[in-house]
Amino acid sequence: MKVLTANRLADGEAVWYANGGWAETIDNADVAYDKAAEDRLEAIGATASANNEVVDVNLIDVTVANGVVEPVRLREKIRAAGPTNRNDLGKQARPVAARAA
Amino acid sequence: MYRYDEFDHDFVQARVAEFSDQVARRLAGEITEDQFRPLRLMNGVYLQLHAYMLRIAVPYGTLNSKQLRMLGHIARKYDKGYGHFTTRQNIQFNWPALSDVPAILADLASVEMHAIQTSGNCIRNVTADHFAGAAADEVADPRPYAEILRQWSSVHPEFSFLPRKFKIAVTGAERDRAAIQTHDIGLHLKKNAAGELGFAVYVGGGQGRTPMIAKKIRDFLPEADLLSYCTAILRVYNLYGRRDNKYKARIKILVHETGVEEITRQVEAEWQELKDADLKLPEADIRAIDAYFAPPALAERPEGDEAVKLARLDSKSFSEWLDQNVVTHRHPDYAAVTISLKAIGEAPGDASDSQMEAVADLAEKYAFDELRVSHEQNLILPHVARADLKAVYDALVDIGLATANSNLISDIISCPGLDYCALATARSIPVAQEISRRFASLERQREIGELKLKISGCINACGHHHVGHIGILGVEKKGAELYQVTLGGSADENTSVGEIIGRGFSSAEITDAIEQIVETYLGLRLDRNEKFIDAYRRVGPAPFKEALYAGEAKAA
């Protein structure tokens, strides 16, 4: 399972592709369950990159448990939440992004 | 300290205008990321995990109050209220928007600062002893030479596209506090028998995945020949340094593969062509730059002795801070103060906007407006009257910066690691925090004595783990963080690269392992005066291996 992630060009904010746009949290990211869906996300990423909306576009591995999208690698977990030494920073600091887990 | 002349002002302003235009074109979609990346890197803008990162140059680690106050302002206005001081005496902001960078650079230019050449394959910020100009043991202030190198290397047309980045460090004292032997070029300013100033020149040091100690290729280079000789080194490197493999592109590899004798011969041959030409530094020019670094007029303050004595009796914590964070100044009535950015449990090198402003106020009030950033990620007030030490201490207590741990186990160098860095393979800040909490007791730390612990979150070694008395390298193994421990490294005049002690430790085990190493040292040292590094050099790795792994061998 994979989701599409990038950083927004203008401010560098980490974003995930969700519901036809780029969301600031991973929670509702579009999950690709098969190769065809991955190809679709990849194409979306390439277009968004070419349109200068985002930079550093990547498909990353995730797991989905009880509807919660969780990155596999620690690096991506930290990107999705914020620095582990400062829970007042990053996505984890936002009330709306309160993680179910 | 150095003041920009008209040329410097115009140069920096022109660069701000140029980069602002480049950012505008990028945001308008007129240039691609591939076109923009090298341009942003030339101006210190990286893309990290959460956001962009802006690295600002602090030339040879010297700042005035106005500049530090501006850094505090930038932290508050454009970032998230803090900045991170680095092992290259620079500062990094972790959260700036690309669209704000032009405004940040304009603010910086207004206080004679910039982010030029803080990235890219060019000559980076020249670093220097953080006690330069104050140290009792230096022959002369090394910073004028660092400034000469800065002027020479800024947008140097021949050396802006080197095989790889290039770092120069300068010290003016026998006791090396600038880690010169871990740099591409290390310069040790000294006097010859005739009393003339010159340099011992070291080449080919570096850390990263292939740590190398620099080799001395010249014992005495007259000061007038500084630029011609450095040019000769850079030319040899630019010509023969490998461009086919990023990991073999630093000059350390060239020196290692070519051999020190042959590289010396090549440099000397090149230098013969250059030494009597236009790169020879005129005496008047050196002295003119020197004048910018003229020490402040230090009035006699003999009351300091008595004041310190009384304050010591009055406060144990002040007394401990004095022992640990205050060092001898060349003027007996003054001292140099280390402001630890390593409060127990905090991220090494981080300072908040209000801390920066408060420290700037202190520098203005008590330290002749001068500040330094040390490569050990602390701030320094280089000239404080001993009579004012208690007032400075009290003010530092108020802002949470009076931790008396300079050179102790909790004075940890740590890179940002996986909490921020796109290259990292493991976290380093939380490891530093946990070790610092484990050894929180100052009494215990002082009992252990001088111990330099350094942590990197990947093989690039930004956290200098190779030269830590205890070094920790975080890697990713089977999806989890694993911490490899090296012992016996050192970054002073007796530079050594630490040896890997054995299998790595998980994040849950690493603090216990460090404690085990420390307890082993305490058990085997000859007496309290034998420092960790000296004890390690005496006994070698065996007792530490035994302590860490013997149980496993028996179990297996």
Image: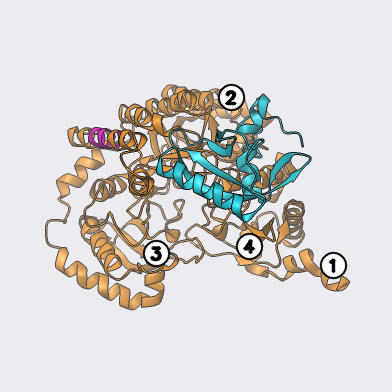
Chain colours: A cyan, B orange
**Disc nearer the start of the sequence (3/1):** 3
Q: Which mark is residue B399?
A: 2
**Disc nearer the start of the sequence (3/2):** 3
**Disc nearer the start of the sequence (1/2):** 2
Q: Secondary structure at mark 2?
A: loop
Q: Chain of mark 1?
A: B
Q: Secondary structure at mark 4?
A: strand
Q: CA distance from mark 1 to mark 4?
A: 20 Å
Q: Position of residue B10 (x, y in %)?
A: 20, 33
What residue is at 35 percent from the left and 69 percent from the top? B242
- Magenta region, residue range: B12-20
Which residue lies under the disc numbered 3? B250
Q: CA distance from mark 3 to mark 1?
A: 41 Å
**Disc nearer the start of the sequence (1/4):** 4
Mark 3 surroundings within 10 Å by alpha-carbon count, few (fewer than 14), some (14 through 19), many (20 or more): many
**Disc nearer the start of the sequence (2/4):** 2
Left or right of B530 in this view: B511: right
Q: Are marks 2 and 4 on the same chain?
A: yes
Q: Are marks 1 and 4 on the same chain?
A: yes
Mark 4 surroundings within 10 Å by alpha-carbon count, few (fewer than 14), some (14 through 19), many (20 or more): many
Answer above or below: position of B341 versus A59.
above
Q: Name which residue type carries label 3.
A: Arg
For the C terminus of chain A, the image quarter is top right
Q: Name which residue type carries label 4.
A: Thr
Q: Chain of mark 3?
A: B
**Disc nearer the start of the sequence (4/3):** 3
Q: Position of residue B285 (x, y in %)?
A: 17, 45
Mark 2 vs mark 4: in front = 4
Q: CA distance from mark 4 to mark 3?
A: 23 Å
Q: Which mark is residue B486?
A: 4
Which residue lies under the disc numbered 1? B551
